[in-house]
Amino acid sequence: MDTIASLFSFITTPVSWVIVQFHTVYGTIFGPDTGWAWGLSIVSLVILIRICLIPLFVKQIKATRAMQTLQPEMKKIQERYKNDKQRQSEEMMKLYKESGTNPLSSCLPILAQSPFFFALYHVLNGIATGKTIGVIDDQLLASARKAHIVGAPLAAKFMDSTDKVTALGATLTDVRVVTAVMIILMSASQFYTQRQLMTKNVDTTVKTPFMQQQKMLMYVFPVMFAIFGINFPVGVLVYWLTTNVWTMGQQMYVIHNNPTPGSKAQAAYLERLFKHVSHHGKTRNRREKAIVKAIVVKGRDRNEFERKFINGLNKAGLAAQSDGSVMKGESAAVAQAEDGTTTTATAPRRQQPKRQSKAQRQSGGTKPAEEATESLSLTKSDEPEDAPAAAGNKAASKPGNGTRSKAQSGQRKGPQRPKSPSKK
């Protein structure tokens, strides 16, 4: 432990200083020796650290999305060079370089949080052993050793002996009950965070070994937290439980507002977006415009949920534009079709040609639009009986150009094709 403490000594003093500053604030409200003052100081330290790590979390989300996009290409490389591991690694690194992604980017928040975790562990371990750490002097050390969180001392562990727990002013039963409940909550929050990521925010159209690996980690991490948690002081358990709850809430926010394309979360988000857009007739903010713009730009590469969203807008008389805005079909000049091509939003529906009467077909002529409409409104019983005969006589009286002047029954009107000489 001394080796680890020496490695992270550069961060131990700042961490202890932050805890003392928060303790000064909460001590004036709840009392300096209470568990509320010290416990809330640890919780506030976690919140402060996680706020500082938000830029790294955004970078982690982008890296994870990029890795999910590369999964099909990675699978092809693995299948192509499955017997040559060196060439497989070279092609993987080449793919990462060309796409500008880094597999380690998804681990940045955890790596950045590790020094603070070890520093806090060292501070709380010093409190448990009665050693001053950083800016925590003898007076603050005595106050921290008196602090209890639901009956468990701040520096007590699940595996501590009865004598050590008694020296901290508590019973072994209280310590083990409190630590066991906190370990269970810590493991459950870790499992739920990973599970909602795998079940809601993963592209279901791509099946890769990466997904199987993530599914395995969903069960491995909670077990690891349960095993190592029995050796953590109560203060460290408060820290780790708080950061797990923060991660869970942060992940829920990302899944709800910026889901992975092709995932169940995207289907739910586009359904909510369609209801809002169809109700207001437009996109309401910059984020909605960015989502609609990204879907329109994809064209034929849209997934099932995105095509359903565009088709729903078209049926509602709305048209998604290339800039992310949504306009009504009457005023929109161009609407995006399902296959990505553009079609006129107010294009008239194609009509079938009107059927002509027998007299019109025999005469070969066309009536004006008014007469054609009037003739279609009449029935066969209303037509004059001599109309076919008069039309036939009129057609027969017209001389043909080099053809017979009268069309015989059963023959086509107009110029007749000369008979070919019969073959003998």
Image (tube, grey):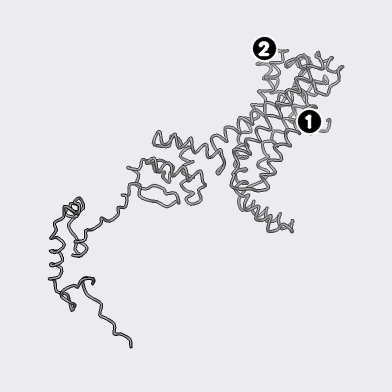
> Is 352 on the left or on the right of 180, as rendered?
left
- Counting from the top left corner in percent of width and height, residue 311 is at 43, 44
Q: Residue at x 64, y 27 (%)?
A: 48
Q: What amino acid is labelled 1 in the image?
A: Phe
Vertical placement of 242 versus 101: above or below?
A: above
Q: Earlier in the sequence, mark 1 or mark 2?
A: 2
Label 1, label 2: how many angstroms apart (C-alpha)?
31 Å
Q: What amino acid is labelled 2 in the image?
A: Phe
Looking at the rendered image, the quarter that the C terminus falls into is bottom left
Query: Residue 30 got which mark?
Result: 2
Vertical placement of 153 versus 363: above or below?
A: above
Q: Most extreme residue toward the bottom, as rendered?
A: 424
Q: Residue at x 75, y 31 (%)?
A: 225
Q: Residue at x 54, y 39 (%)?
A: 266
- Counting from the top left corner in percent of width and height, residue 398 is at 13, 71
- Which secondary structure lies at badge 2? helix
Vertical placement of 51 versus 140: above or below?
A: below
- Which secondary structure lies at badge 1? helix
